[in-house]
Image (cartoon, rainbow, N blue to C red):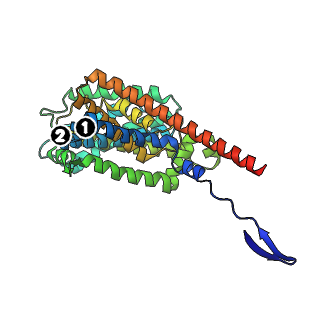
């Protein structure tokens, strides 16, 4: 209690109510973002027991490389989902970026021109998606599926299955894609750096916060003076840049990419977003959970390979893991709501 003074003597002021730590924890760390961390922790324990080879040095190099590339591509998908849309052209954009850098990045070529041209290609394709989805208000799934077909078909007509006579990525790009520090591939380190920058932009800048505002409620954002078209088109430009960056790293890591290089990322990025607890109706998202989910998905696949699962069996297990992760998110939210109701009911009884 705190004492104050008035003209008639001391007045007792009520003590501020104690912070509800459960509510505070709920809003700081939503249950839907925690599932990916729990899944990764459980997988590490299971892998250490059932498939210790998957945690070995060479395996970690592969997992960290592919997880980093997947995380960067998934960040692009995350931005699209934050706007309330979905992008199924990611595989085509990744392949197109790799195709440009391999086709024009022959020995002696100026990579300072080739790499920006490859990234610009990805940005332009993504902006075309953004125009049809944002300005013309067409269905995002239909638009991006059409883009996937047009870009993939165009690449096949232009370069064929192999992007050049040798089909080899530039040596300097391969050096970046295969560089490791303590068995951790540079792709994962780059993904973490990109993730930190992206998270800072989304949470600490006005333009970044507007992405979630537009995705949560476009009409309300418009009423608040947000230029929704500009925000969405700028976001699609960033999406293309992230896809292009992932395509460059993937080409460097593989060394000899072809037209199918981006195929796994069409649905893998959506799966990562789901495991990371990103709401497909639009709104805020967690970059940290996204990176964690990317590591989980790649480590799971590597562990299944080490155990001896076939490709079909690995797909089944990954689908089952997705269902479990999404179920864990729903269960966690239900448990927190139940605990919250119980605490409020107990407080009401004490006051009565």
Q: Nearer the viewer, residue 163 or 322?
A: 322
Residue 160 appears left or right of 11:
left
229 with respect to 180 (left or right): right
The residue located at (40%, 45%) in the rendering is: 238
x and y percentages locating residue 126 in the rendered image: 40, 38
From the image, tell me which residue sits under label 1.
Answer: 98
Q: Is residue 123 visible?
A: no
Q: Is residue 292 visible?
A: yes
* Res 215 → quadrant: top right
| Residue 5, x across and y down, in percent | 80, 77
Classed neighbour count for the residue bearing mark 2: other residues with Cα under 10 Å, few (<14), some (14–19), many (≥20) = many
Q: Secondary structure at mark 2?
A: loop
Task: Describe the element under mark 1 as helix, strand or loop.
Answer: helix
Q: Of residues 316 and 46, which is closer to you in this image?
A: 46
Residue reaching furthest top?
A: 312
Q: Earlier in the sequence, mark 1 or mark 2?
A: 1
Label 2 near label 1: C-beta < 8 Å? yes
- In the rendered image, residue 255, in percent from the top left (x then y), is placed at 17, 38
Q: Which residue is mark 2?
A: 169
Give the x, y percent position of residue 144: 42, 29
Point 63% across, 44% down: residue: 340
Q: Nearer the viewer, residue 255 or 36?
A: 36
Q: Quadrant of the N terminus?
A: bottom right
Q: Quadrant of residue 91?
A: top left
The quadrant in which residue 45 appears is top left
Residue drawn at (53%, 51%) of the image:
28
């Amino acid at each position: 209690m705190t004492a104050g003074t008035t003209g008639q003597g001391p007045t007792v002021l009520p003590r501020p109510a104690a912070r509800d730590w459960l509510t505070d924890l709920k809003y700081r760390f939503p249950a839907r973002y925690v599932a990916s961390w729990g899944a990764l922790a459980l997988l590490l324990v299971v892998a250490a027991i059932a498939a210790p080879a998957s945690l070995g040095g060479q395996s970690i190099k592969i997992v960290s490389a592919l997880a980093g590339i997947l995380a960067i591509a998934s960040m692009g998908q995350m931005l699209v989902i934050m706007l309330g849309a979905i992008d199924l052209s990611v595989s085509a954009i990744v392949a197109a970026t790799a195709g440009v850098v391999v086709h024009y990045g022959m020995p002696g070529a100026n990579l300072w021109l080739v790499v920006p041209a490859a990234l610009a290609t990805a940005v332009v394709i993504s902006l075309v998606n953004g125009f049809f989805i944002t300005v013309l208000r067409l269905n995002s799934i239909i638009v991006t599926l059409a883009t996937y077909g047009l870009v993939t078909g165009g690449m096949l007509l232009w370069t064929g299955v192999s992007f050049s006579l040798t089909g080899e990525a530039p040596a300097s790009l391969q050096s970046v894609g295969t560089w490791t520090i303590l068995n951790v591939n540079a792709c994962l380190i780059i993904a973490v750096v990109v993730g930190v920058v992206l998270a800072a932009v989304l949470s600490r800048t006005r333009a970044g916060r507007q992405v979630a505002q537009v995705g949560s409620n476009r009409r309300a954002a418009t009423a608040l003076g947000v230029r929704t078209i500009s925000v969405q088109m700028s976001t699609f430009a960033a999406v293309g840049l992230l896809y292009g960056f992932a395509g460059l790293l993937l080409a460097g890591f593989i060394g000899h990419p072809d037209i199918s290089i981006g195929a796994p990322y069409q649905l893998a990025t959506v799966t990562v977003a789901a495991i990371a607890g990103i709401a497909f109706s639009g709104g805020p998202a967690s970059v940290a959970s996204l990176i964690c989910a990317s590591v989980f998905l790649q480590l799971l696949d590597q562990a299944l390979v080490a155990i001896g699962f076939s490709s079909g069996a690995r797909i089944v297990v990954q689908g089952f893991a997705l269902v479990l992760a999404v179920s864990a998110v729903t269960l966690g939210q239900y448990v927190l709501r139940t605990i919250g109701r119980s605490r409020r009911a107990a407080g009401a009884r004490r006051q009565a």
